[in-house]
Amino acid sequence: MSNQPKPFVIPSRQPVTKEPDPGGRWSPQFPDMMGYKSQGGGKVPDDYQWNTNPKQWQEELTVESLARRYDALRVLPPKPAAPALPEGTKPEGSK
C-alpha cells in the first residue's frame, strides 16, 4: 500500500480559481474566454446551396496528381555551372 495522500478534488473549481463558468458567461477577469454560449450554434438555411464540395476534391486526389502539383509549384534556383579548367591543363590524378 502506498502512503501517499489521496488528491483533494474540489467539486467546483470556479469559486477557487475565480474563472467564469464553462457555460460562457462573460467575466471582467477573463474577457477573452469563450464558453459554450459564445461558440455559435448557427443553422444552415434549407434553401442554401453549396458552391463547392471540398470532400469530393479530396477524394479525387491521387498520388500522381499531388506529385504533378508539387512539381509545378516547386521552384529551384539555377544550378551553377561546373568550373571549367583552362585549356592545356590536366586535372590532378589523370595521365
Image (cartoon, rainbow, N blue to C red):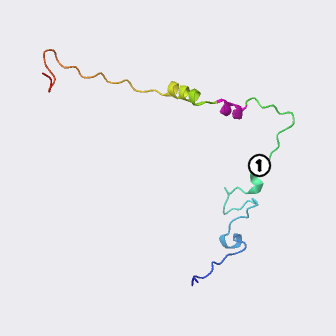
The x and y percentages for residue 79 are 35, 24
On the rendered structure, is 47 left or right of 86? right
| Residue 36, quarter of picture | bottom right
**Could you tell whether 39 is left or right of 8 in the image?**
right
The disc labelled 1 sits on which kind of residue?
Gly
The stretch of residues the image draws in magenta is 53-60
Q: Nearer the viewer, residue 4 or 77?
A: 4
The quadrant where residue 33 appears = bottom right
Q: Residue furthest front?
A: 95
Q: Quadrant of the C terminus?
A: top left
Q: Closest to the observer: 19 or 6?
A: 6
Residue 57 included in the magenta stretch of the image = yes
Instruction: Tell me if residue 54 is in the magenta stretch.
Output: yes
Give the residue drawn at x 82%, y 40%.
Answer: 44
Q: Position of residue 83 (x, y in %)?
A: 24, 22
Magenta segment, prevailing SS (helix, strand or loop)? helix
Specify the quadrant that holds the N terminus: bottom right
Residue at mark 1: 40
